[in-house]
Image: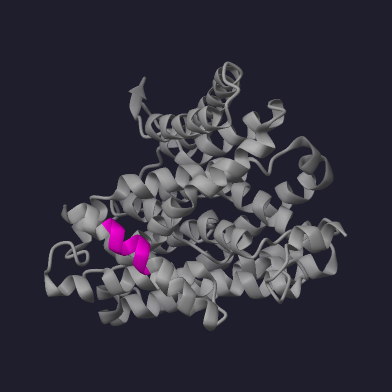
Amino acid sequence: MEVLLCLSISLIGGLLMSRVAKKLNLPAVTAYLITGLLLGPFCVGALGISGLGFISLDAVADLDVISNVALGFIAFTIGNEFRLTQLRQMGRQAIVVGIFQALITTVVVDIALVALHFLKPEVISLSSAITLGAVAAATAPAATLMVVRQYKADGPMTRLLLLVVAIDDAVGLMVFSASFGVALALESGSVNIVTVVVEPIVEIVLSLGLGAAAGLVLYWVERFFHSRSKRLSISIGFVLLTVGLSMVEFDVAGIHCGFSLLLVCMMTGTLFCNICDFSEELMGRVDSWTAPLFVLFFVLSGAGLDLTVLSSAAVLLVGGVYIVFRSLGKYVGAYSSCAMTGCDEKITKHLGITLLPQAGVALGMALTAQALSDGAVVRNVILLSVLVYELIGPTLTKISLQAAGEINPAGRTSARQKNAS
């Protein structure tokens, strides 16, 4: 009963708050996150009334399955952007921008935090500084996708953006694994090649392989059904299946093997949309089905933000440096790589701002980083950055897409129709 009450209040409250956000010209994503903060353990939840709000962070964590499923559908939808027609047009640009902006962001944040370490070694260790630089590469696709959907954004920058945030996950995983391996080596005095090189490559290969297999089987199964509702049900079932399988972990010959939820579901969507002639219509139906799920995802994300990080001066200092230089790295990285690949001036100028949101992937990396001697610093800094980026990121994404001319300012007609005309 308590879980159902919390979920219903979260869904209804988030939607009502989105009406307020619309009056303030803010994206609905921001409204959902604020609703979560209000219902979380530091506001309404602090009253201790079960069912009225989330009385603890553990109560929010108990509903992680909803967040994982939502991320699976988000990744599946983004995989739809990797159609061969899209890749022929801007595949090279997306790969170059996706890789370079991530690497440049890591370098910029590394330099800033390593300098802070030498100035104030008691605030952050060298290993944590290097690890945070790698976490900085990660971009959250969820908020970006929601803004694109809400405002029906479409155009060259929007299509490039969705491709880049998808590529960003694989790049971020590789960068983090290598940097975290170096950080562990600094603390232990020995380098583990398996952890630094082999395991991240294995994870990416396994994730793409599982996703490709799921996409093929999904297409094969869909052919046995002609009813739209049954095809929709099969698609939902397969996304749930891939989310579940992506959580499997095992060891082979001393190598830890696992999967990236986002990569698995992206690959499933990518392969399915390229071999299935009715995938476009089916994806549209999946999008409409997942709308309430995404509202819950962002409300739960807001409720799960730990506001106690705001009470630590050290975390505020490191977090401030991290946020400023990560933002600089994302913008400079996107600007320079877009210029290098000959992107349009509007894309070159505005793409970097849309890459600021950071959430689930970064939090997962921060959880891994707690194995460091001062891993709590990494976790708290990422919690602070998620709080900041998730609240302001969607609005900045909307402003950038408007500036690029890919959102109708009035918001009354479809941007797709406008751009097509």
Helix, strand or loop for the magenta stretch, by majority: helix
Q: Position of residue 161 (x, y in %)?
A: 68, 57
Q: Nearer the viewer, residue 103 or 227?
A: 227
Residue 223, placed above or below residue 236: above
Q: Position of residue 273 (x, y in %)?
A: 67, 33
Q: Nearer the viewer, residue 220 or 144?
A: 220
Q: Quadrant of residue 280?
A: top right
Which range is magenta?
7-13
Give the side of residue 33 with respect to residue 214, left or right. left
Give the side of residue 243 with respect to residue 408, left or right. left
Q: Quadrant of residue 416?
A: bottom right
Magenta includes 319? no
Residue 122 appears in view: no
Tell me what residue is drawn at x 44 percent, y 30 percent: 237
Q: Quadrant of residue 267?
A: top right
Tell me what residue is drawn at x 59 percent, y 35 percent: 269
Tell me what residue is drawn at x 17 percent, y 56 percent: 2
Tell me what residue is drawn at x 21 percent, y 64 percent: 54
Residue 90, placed above or below residue 280: below
Residue 279, placed above or below residue 323: above
